[in-house]
Structure formats: C-alpha cells, structure tokens
Image (cartoon, grey):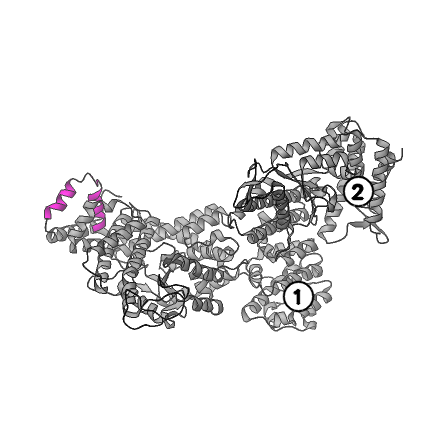
Amino acid sequence: MPKTFPQLISDSYQRRLEGFQAAHSDPDWLAKRLAEFPNYPLFAEHLKLLWGTSDFVGEQSETYPEMFQQLVDSGDLQRSYSREDFQQAISQRLLHLKDAVNEDQLARALRQFRRREQLRIIWRDFSRQASMPETTRELTWMAEAAITASLDRLYPITCEELGTPFNGSDQGALGQKMLVLAMGKMGAEELNLSSDIDLIFAYPEKGETRRSATSPRGKTVSHQEFFTRLGQKLIAALDRQTADGFVFRVDMRLRPYGQSGALVMSFDALEEYYLTQGREWERFAMVKARAVAGESRDIQQLDEILRPFVYRKYLDFGAIDALRDLKRSINRELKRKGMQTDIKLGPGGIREIEFITQAFQLVRGGRNSALQIPSLYQALQQLGADQIIDSSDRDSLWNAYSFLRNTEHALQGIADKQTQQLPEDELSQQRVALIVGCDSWADFQQQLQGHRDYVMSVFGDMFADPDTQADDKDADGKDLDYESFWRQTPELAELLEHLLAAGYGEPQAVAEQLYGIYQSKAVLGLDLEPRSRLDKLMPNIVTACAVVDNNSLTLSRVVGLIQAVLRRSAYLVLLAENPTALQQLVLLCQSSSWIAEQLTAYPALLDELLDSESLFTAQSKDLLQDQLRQQMLRVADDDLEQQMDVIRYFVRSNSLRVAACEITEVIPLMQVSDFLTWIAEVVVEHSMTIAWQQLSQQYGQPSGSSFQTPGFIVLGYGKLGGIELGYKSDLDLVFLHRGTAGQTVGGPRSIDSSTFYARLGQRIIHILSTVTPSGAAYEIDMRLRPSGNSGMLVSSLTAFEKYQRESAWTWEQQALVRARVVAGEKALADDFNRLRRAVLMQPRDKEVLRAEVEQMREKMRKHLGRPSKEGKYSLKQGAGGIVDIEFMVQFAVLAWSHNHPEISRWSDSIRILESLAQSGLISEQQSSLLIDAYKRYRSAGHRLQLQNQLAEVSSSELLQCRELVETQWKQLFKK
C-alpha cells in the first residue's frame, strides 16, 4: 500500500473525514483513534484508503457513525467470520426485537445486518486483510444467514396463515420445509460485492396443508400455494427496497420455465421438467447448484434427481458445442450493448474462465465424481491433480480469475453498485488501480490485458470451431462439399463416386456399408442434433482415412465404430471436436482389428485418444497401482458395481495403451507381456482388497489376521505366472490361505475361517469375471487348483503341500514351475515360494519323468491341437512350437533342480533357459537359440492377436526356428 495517495483520493478522504466528525456525537473519538490505536496499528492508513476509494463505506460511516464506531472498537474489521459467526450475528439482531417478529421487523433487521457486514467485508477486501476467496465466501455466508434466518421466522407465520404442509409419510411431528437451491456464484460460494442471488425453490411432496396445535384454526391450501406464499415472503424480505435499503437482489429466472414458470415446484415436477425439457444452459447452471436451506434428507433426494441431468455417465463432449453456442449469444448481446470491455462477460473475462472449467466438469464429471463440485477454485485444483490440464495452465487461469475478481470487487465496492464495466473518469480509475494494487491506471490496464489475452487464448483453443473442410479437395483440386453431401442422405452410386474421388482403392464394400447405415432405422430415426453431429463428422472421417494404407479397410473399421455409437452422439462430438483424437482412431483402426473391436465394444475408451502422450505411454506397475487407487477414491466403499466398472475400464484403457505402444514399436515384445501382466496383477491385488474389506464388514476377520496380514495369497499360473500375458489371455488362479482354525472375530456375524476364505475366493472371482454392461475384466480359470474342478476352491497351504507331495500328477508339477504369488500376504507368499521350490527340487527318476512329460505332450497335441488349415502352422501346438519349448523347460526344472536349486527360482521360460545355461546344463548357444525362437513365436502371436487372427502362420514361415526346437526336443526325449 503506498505511503502517499493520489490527490483526488486524498481529497475524497478529507471530505469524508470532515463529514463524519460533523455527524458523530463524539467528534474526539476518531481523532483519538487516528492518533493512537495499539489494537489496530494500520487503522489510519486503512481508513484513508477506504474513505478515499469507497463512497459506500464513507457514506455508511457518516450516516451511521455509531455503527462504524462499534465496528472499529469491536475488532471485527480485523478478523474473518465463519459461517456460524454470520448466523449468530443475525440471530442476536433478531433477539433484540420484542415479542413475535413480524415481516416488517424482519426486513429492517436484515437490512441493518447487511449494512454493517457489507461495510466490514469491503473494508477487509480493499485493505487486503482478506483474500479474494475469503471475501467471496463471507459474502455467500452472509446471504445464507439471511435466507435461513428469514425462513425460520417466515415459516411459522405462513403456517399460522395457511396451515402446515406435511409429507404423506409423516405422522404430524414435523412439517415439510422448503428447499432453497442457490445457483451461480452463491452456489459456488463465490458471491461478489454486488451479486444478485440466483435461487430455485422446491418442496418434497404435493398435498394439502393441515391444521396443527400451533395453528388450530383457519383455512388450508395446497402445498403448492403454501410454498409459493412462503417463497414470495422470502423474496420480499431480501429483495424489497425500503428506507433501510435491500439485503440481496433475488433472481428467480433460473427456475424451470423461467419467469413464466411457477415460483416453486415439487420434486416430482422438477424431475419431470429436467427429464423431458431441461436445456443445455440449465445443465451449466446446475454445475454450481447447492442447497442452502432445507432438511438434509430432502437435499439428498433432490441431489439424486438433479445429478444425472447435470453429469452424464459418458464423456459428454456435446457440452463444449453447447457452451460455444451460449458464448456466441453472450458476445452478440455484448456487441449490441457496446459492452465489450465488461470484465465479466467480455473477451478474456470471468465468464470465459468459468466456461473453460465448466466444460471440463461437464465433459468428464459423469465419469469423475471428484469434478462434481460447484467451486471454481476446487474444480481447477482437481483438474490439475487429475492431469486433465497442466499445472501451469491451472495456476495461470486461477491468477487471471483472481485478478479479474479483485477488479470486479473494486468496481462494485466503490459505490455498492452492480457493475463490471471499467470506468472512464480519472478518480474511479485511480481508485481501481489503488485497490487492485497497481502503481497506476496504465499499469493496471497492462496487467489486465495480459490476463485477458491469456484467457482468450485458452478459451479460443478450447472452443474454436474445428476445421472440417480444410483439405476436402479431389485429385483435380475441386472442392468436395462433404458435409452438405451427407446431409442429403446420398445414394449408393453417389457414395461410390465420392470414395473414388477421395482416393479409396477398394470403395465398393465401404460404399455399401455406408449406404446401409444411412438407410438404416438407426440413422433415419435420429433427432436433429445427433444427425447434425453425424453429418458433421462423416467428412472428417472420410478425409482422415483416405490418406492411410489400406484406406478402405480402415474406413470400414472406423465406420463400424460410428455405427455402434449413433445413439450416444457425445462420442461423435468427441471426434468432431478433437482432430487429434480422430487421427489416433484412424491410426489404431488401420493397425489393428482387435483395437477397432475394443473401441467399438467399449466406446468410453475413446477418451484415451485425447492425450497422445498418455496413449503411447505404457505405465510401470507402481504407476498403475497409483492410478487405480486414485480412480477408486472417487467410488463409495460399498458401491461394488461402480468399483467393478472402474476395474474394467482400467484394464481396457491400459491394455489399449500397451497395444498402441506395440503397433508403433514404442516397446518390444518382452515388455508388452510385462505391461499386460502388471495390469492383471494390479487388478487382482485390488480385487482382493475390495473383497476382503466387504467380507470383513460382514463377518469380521479370521483370528490372527488383518488387512495387512490376511493370511491369504493368490497364485498366478500359466501365462500370468510366466509373465507372458497376451491381449486375450485368461487368468489361471489358485487361492491359498494359512489354515487358521476357529471363527472370524470383530464383525456383526461370525463364520468359520475356512468358510470366510472360500467366500473371499468366490468374491474375487465375481469381481474379476462377472459380465456387467462393461463386460468382464478377465475370464478366470481355476482348474489348476488341487484336484481341479472337483477340489476345494480355496486350500490351506498345508493341504496344498500334502497334495503336491502325495497326489499331484506330473503335469500338475509342470504347471507349478510357472506358478508365482501375484497378490496377498508377503509372509505367506514367502512360505509358498519355499514350498514350491522344495516340491520342484524333489529327486525324480529322469526316465520315468521323461516318459510322462512326453506322454502328456502327445495327449495335449491330440486333444488341444486343432488341425491347422492346409499350408498353416500352429505357433502354439505345432511340432517345434511354443508348447514344446515350455515342456522342455518344465522337464529341465523337474529333472535337474534337485542338484541345481538355482534353476527352480524363476517362473518364466526365458529366465529359466538363461539359468540352465548359467548352470552348465545346456550350452549358451542352445539357450540363446531357444530364447530367440520363443520370442519370435510370441511376437508373431501378438501380431496375430492384434488382428483377431488365430495363432497360425504360413507353413513356410519360421522353418529354422521349428527345426531347431524339434532337434532340441529329440535330443532331450529320445536319448
């Protein structure tokens, strides 16, 4: 704050000082405070600032000098208020009134309350004792206190006049209360110094009022009439201009049907309106909605009605288009009124920052409940935390918002007037610059323009119309008017002509596919908006696919996806609004029919195409664990359905990222399997956690166990155990527990511990494999547990050891080679690892073992090896293929671990082959050649999976690898 003030401001202060001293009954009071005021050392400086810059503060101080003296001496100018402080302040003012408070007395008390607190808030804001968020919160709490205090007095008055409204289920104890929904800045706790308060009134149930003990006589009316009368009284108490001024201007235009609608509506009527007639701008308004009066149960009920209207379960990119239209209409109105310099509605102003934030909330809020918050600051912080926007953009937007809101407060606090227009007179300009903290008006304008330019840039990038026609020319350079062409529902011949002109090599099948779609009931029955979105997107798709290899096949795959999402047109908007996402879609569909199939079956995955960096980055296990943990924080602990949906999306979105990395050769084969395995491990771990928590709430926990030491582990066999998962792999699992006897403890019900663990296993399987609308996370195969399908679902470690030592077949011990712990208690996992190695290291008759392994291989070849088509070779079951290598590795571990314990350590074939060479059991060359063949097979298998093809190659391919493996097989099993 400057030590000297501009002359105009000093003159204004001096005039106010003289007027105050003339008006005060004790002229010496202020002189004493200015001379010495230990409790407020900066009082003199702040007084000069406030009386020099705010006519409102000066006038109120001069008109009500005793009120100002009480404010100063009480210390309230130096302290912030809580919500409870405001409630207490208005309650004390009403207590001073005698007898029953009538409506006129209430109105006067409210205005006196507002006069004092408004002066205090402006004082603290201009003197920078309060931050901008503190100022907006206190203004909101002041409004809330005025509303609740008014309703507390007006409700019994209205009941006495018209009877009491009761819910149909009430037995007469408590009457229905009106629910007041605060919209806009009040809902977000962001009121400015001269805000209207936007309200919507509602009540729970229709009916007729009844007479009660407090009002036994008089007429009764419908609940609609009762709450209408109550709402009118509340508006008058707050809004009516009297000799004491007003409290808050009340704006009811955001209610259903606006000014022509009923003043108050029942919950059922509200639900019907928003379900059938709710408009896009009403969704935007509801983002900031917050109940400020009403019973908690009624508030929860109304929230359940409104939330689905505001936040859609899918990614709602249609919100951006609607916000763009709303902004256009605002700009037209500003231009008509000559208000382009308006800091709220003008370019780069407050409203554009709000639109940017709300757009992300509406687009993603249905899938990310953490974004379902009215506060702009909290929403920006969450967007940054979720990496939806860069932290630098988050901070810059907030800095711009803070500067604009401080400017708005300066403009309004000068005279307590509702304005966002920059002043033209010199005194007001000096005042604004001084209040905001700038050296001069020129300095203020420079800072303001810098913030507005930044906001305009971000807003422009986000809300600009995507360029859909830039390159739509045929080979002769003639414009291809695709959009108007699609709107006309073209004939087959016209489609074929357009595809040929665009450069498609084999357009006939695609033309027929497109013609079928446009003649289908699904398209012909589309409403105007989704049909417009489809017609807008189609030329983009045709243009984007035309330039890639296999353009006809690629277009066919993309169009198949579009056909699947016609009824969810927000996905059409996503692709139309985000050219980068469309380019990624074309690349993925061109490269892989499996990816195209996944995107078509689960279009929510299209969200992943928006961020290229994320799409082409496969995450480590630690990052995957953190990602799933954060996503689960947004879901209630008891909402299993939503938890399962989160798991399914997690699996599919991260598998998509791995596939995107593989087709672009960002990661090699070995890492592809690593990443896919990590995804599964994280999901199994989290599913076990969910299952444990839910069962513990029902039954407590087995004695001696806890969340950290559950006495339970999940074993991964097969590809999961061998860290070799593919895109379509199921999970081979086995469940083991420590074998604690007795009953569970600490829960509402107690069950046998073994039953608890059995149910734990069942619950894990349910979480992973149940088919929901989002599909299954994984198919689960439990056949490798002791005794297979006829065995116990969950075994104790002791029973497992006994089975392995006494009853297990050789093929089961082969399977044990690829077994490892993927989730559960570490101490029990260590016990299992010791047991596994002990079983694998048992001495065995090598000739008997050799015969049994070879016999099992032949049995598998007969039962599992389907005859390959002529000229085809099965990578898995063919002679010299993947299974032959795995069987040789398993034989080696079972045959030689007794004398070479080090080869029993690993569960994956490649590291076992490396350890066999290191132990001198096979040569380095043999190990290297077998590893190379194994990788080649698996790499070919991955590529075929991505094209939804069988794991078969031409019989002329990989001959050298096959011959090598067959030679090694013969050497191992024929000597």
Name the residue that disc number 2 marks.
883
Marks 2, 1: nearer the viewer = 2
Dots 2, 1 in contact, CB < 8 A:
no
Residue lying farthest to the right in this orientation: 975
Q: Amino acid at mark 1?
A: Asp
Q: Secondary structure at mark 2?
A: helix
Asked if residue 349 shows in the view, the reply is no
Q: Secondary structure at mark 1?
A: loop
**Image coordinates for residue 359, horizontal then vertical, percent:** 47, 57
Which mark, residue 907? none
**Residue 168 figure quarter:** bottom left
**Image coordinates for residue 157, horizontal then vertical, percent:** 27, 65
Closer to the N terminus: mark 2 or mark 1? 1
Decide which of 449, 925 is in the foreground and name it. Answer: 925
Asked if residue 293 shows in the view, the reply is yes
Q: Quadrant of the N terminus?
A: top left
Name the residue that disc number 1 marks.
476
Q: Is residue 352 above or below residue 130?
A: below
Decide which of 277, 482 is in the foreground and name it. Answer: 277
Q: Main secondary structure of the magenta part?
A: helix
Within-10-Å neighbours for mark 1: few <14, some 14–19, many 20+: few
Decide which of 969, 741 is in the foreground and name it. Answer: 741
**Magenta residues?**
27-51
Q: Is residue 16 magenta?
A: no
Within-10-Å neighbours for mark 2: few <14, some 14–19, many 20+: some
Q: Measure the alpha-carbon separation of dots 2 and 1.
A: 56 Å
**Image coordinates for residue 2, horizontal then vertical, percent:** 25, 43
